[in-house]
Amino acid sequence: MSRPAFASFVLPPWLAHALRAQRGPVPWMAVTRGALAAGPLLLLAVLFDRASLGVVAAIAAMLAGINDRPGSRRASVRRLGVPAVAGAGGMLVGTYAGHSTGVLVLTLILTGLGLVAGGISAIGPVASAAGTQLLVATAIGAGMPLPEPGWVRALAFVAGAGWLLALRLLLPTPGAIVGDYRFDGERKAVAAVYDAVAELLDAVGSSAAIARRVSLTAALDHAQDALAGPRLRRYASSAAERRLRAQYAAALPLAEAATALAWGGEGVSARASEGPRRLAAAVRGNTHTGPLPAPNRSAPALRALDDALLHAAEVFDQGEGRDLHTRRRSPRALLRSVFGAGGREYGLRVALCFGASAAIAQALHHAQWYGQHEHWYWLPATAVFLVKPDLGPLLSRVLCRAAGTVLGAVVFAGFAAALPQPGGLIALVALSGALIPVATRHFAAQTAVVTVLVLALVMVGGEPPASWSRIGETLLACAIVLVVGHLPMPGQRGGGVRARLAAAGDAAQAYLNHVLNESAAPATSDATHIPGKPGAPSPRPSDPRPLRWTLRREAYRTLAEARTAIALAAAELPALARHSEGAAEIVVVLERIVDTTTACAVHLDDSGRLTTRHTDRLAALLDELAEGRERVGLRMPELPLAV
């Protein structure tokens, strides 16, 4: 019996991505913060007859709400604060540029800002959000007709975002009754690392081991971010903060041992994962670990796992340990991100989209195509969101933006006809703010909610309904971004993917070189000694493992970032996706190299020398990497094997 033709039909990647939405529980606290942010600020401003300032503050709160993602409170200071400061600067620059320059000069200023903000966005998620808010606020400041001077608008912008940040820092999470509630996000993230270690140990020897190792990397990345940022209180919380950092640092040798066991491929008993699970429970409950079941010490990786468990138990009891949570990036590395291939390509596209949309919008505005609706700034502001590659593939972004805008404009038109003004519109703003944390799971849903909120703000500010002009400007922005996104650029295409791959290769090289340099040190014992037991040699004067764990974290983290960039590039239309072909295979090889390097490190700790299995595997992987590099024409560092 033949199968129906549609049974084997597979959606193209760009369409599948447009239809895909994130899943997970409803972030009720983020919903609460969203409801208490833009709406109350707008209401307060209206009551004091300063509706225009309320609109600016509500816009800032809305943009901060988009960045209000799950995580720790300390991480939210940077994730929400840095973009808010950039947005306030953009509001200041845009206001004075829009009021004191002509169309040509203003367009050149906006284009230059787009070039700078686009290059900075290549650094990472926080920098990308900062670049976006800088450009959006600049366009709003230049085009929105408000009576206040630029510095007052900038203060209102900071106040709006700062209010949401204050809610994020002060409101307790329901059920977070263990210790200081302000550390519930950090505690949850660190506990997830120990759970991920246990799940990887359960999967050792099975086909699920690779996926579990990837999940462990994601958990470590999340915990690293959760512990980053300023201290919430300088003195009273120092003990709790030190304890959490020590617990995170104690998970690194456990993760290393578990990865080495997964590389070996021989299954371990269920007893091996009981210890990490008890450690996870101790982190969540802020309690002592109690006795931990010790695994069998029959192999180097198992002995490393046992030693790591003993060390973790000691750290949990004393609350002291190494602080390895901070991800430090040198100024040189940051500049390389901005001025490298990825930063240049991103900056040029953002500059072209932002500048071209601003020029077209002002030309249409001065030609009186907009009638009484002076919203030319919507066009460049929309183009900024559409041109961001970290929001998804280009065509997927365009389709979601268009569909979301049409839906949001139609929904708002119905509400505007039925709701009383301004009270009903302010309530609609509060409702939209509450929906943003849920709507961020899909770009079309987020666009629909933001469209309703923005159109409500326009009417509260005293302007007539603008649903249809909003649709027209969005569709025009979609067309501009589609054209610019497919234009040829100087240099090689796929700069973002290539930059991520180069960073991952550099990190893998640094990690491998460090481990191999350890192997070059004179051996101090035979191949069968057990560290920490009678007969073991004295430790080296300086323990090289903290640096090794830091290098290992950076290697896996950059590989995860490269995987994300490649997945987004692969979902582009074929004309763009072909520029990143073969990159995914290189990432797989690099991950195997880092896995093998981890197994080498654990074996070196145990015996002081590598086996032929380790060296042969490394040599084969390095040959495979060299072949892949030549096949796809990607610049990758040479990884020398010297053992």
Image: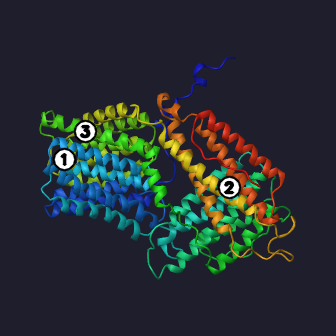
x and y percentages locating residue 450 in the rendered image: 32, 47
x and y percentages locating residue 65 in the rendered image: 36, 56
x and y percentages locating residue 444 in the rendered image: 39, 40
Label 1, secondary structure: give it. helix
Q: Nearer the viewer, residue 620 or 221?
A: 620
The structure residue drawn at horizontal position 51% and vertical position 47%, both measured from the top left corner, is 23
**Residue 424 seen anywhere in this rendered image of the structure:** no
The structure residue drawn at horizontal position 40% and vertical position 48%, both measured from the top left corner, is 439
Which amino acid type corresponds to the residue marked 3 in the rendered image? Arg
Q: Nearer the viewer, residue 206 or 33?
A: 206
Which amino acid type corresponds to the residue marked 1 in the rendered image? Gly
Q: Are marks 2 and 1 in contact (CB under 8 Å)?
A: no
- Image quarter (top left, top right, bottom left or bottom right) of the N terminus: top right
- Total numbered circles: 3
Label 2, secondary structure: give it. helix
Q: Are marks 2 and 3 in contact (CB under 8 Å)?
A: no
Q: What residue is disc 1 on? A: 143
Q: Report whether 380 appears left or right of 339.
A: left
Q: Nearer the viewer, residue 273 or 363?
A: 363
- Image quarter (top left, top right, bottom left or bottom right) of the C terminus: bottom right
x and y percentages locating residue 250 in the rendered image: 65, 69
**Residue 114 seen anywhere in this rendered image of the structure:** yes
